[in-house]
Amino acid sequence: MYDEQLKELEGNFKQAKNTGTAVDVAKSLIDIGRALAAAAQAATRTLGKDGEELEKLNKEFFEKVQDVRKETRSAVLKDPTMEYAKEHMPGHGLLWALGQAAIDTFLKYDSPSFWAWTFTQVRSGKTWGESVTSSPQQFFEESRSRLLQSKSQALSNIDGRISELRGLLNPAHASSARAR
């Protein structure tokens, strides 16, 4: 029973995580597409122009190209950069932890899955502070831990009951077991 529940919990978490990632990737692709479309529009406005007007439109086009670069860099660097830092540079003191937390928080605020999680947590009765500082991973780990503790407690209860029944069926066995 517990193993099935644990497997279901892990499957649900994996599915939720994959859905969140897909939503975040879709948002990043939309942002990149929007920036590319704006750059293309700016480029088409330069056709047939000359002089100061062309210079002004070229400047606008260059700004739009910078937006494309920024959106692409943001999408590419978000998760991999933080994951690399967490895995390869752990425990570099308080300043490192604060900087890492600040960057992680900044990147989360741009993520639709972060806001979906926060919304569901607030709707389930958690405070705003609890909602924005918790994560699906944390929720999964806490749920998994509770399930494993419950399993351990149930098995311990069963073992205790088996010992009691053995004692009732065989009083000599029970006294030798107590002596150990």
Image (cartoon, grey):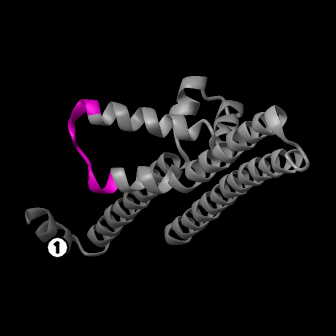
Give the amino acid type for the residue marked by disc 1 in the picture: Ala
Where disc 1 sits, the SS reads helix
Instruction: Indicate left or right for 33 with 128 as reference.
Output: right
Residues in magenta? 86-95
Q: Quadrant of residue 157?
A: bottom left
Tally the numbered discs. 1
Q: Quadrant of residue 108?
A: top right
Q: Does residue 176 sit above or below 86 in this rendering?
A: below
Q: Quadrant of the C terminus?
A: bottom left
Please report the residue visible at 64 percent of the width from the left and 64 percent of the height from the top. 15
Please report the residue visible at 69 percent of the width from the left and 43 percent of the height from the top. 62
Q: Quadrant of the N terminus?
A: bottom right
**Residue 144 shows in the view:** no
Q: Residue furthest left?
A: 179
156 within the magenta span: no
**Residue 129 shows in the view:** yes
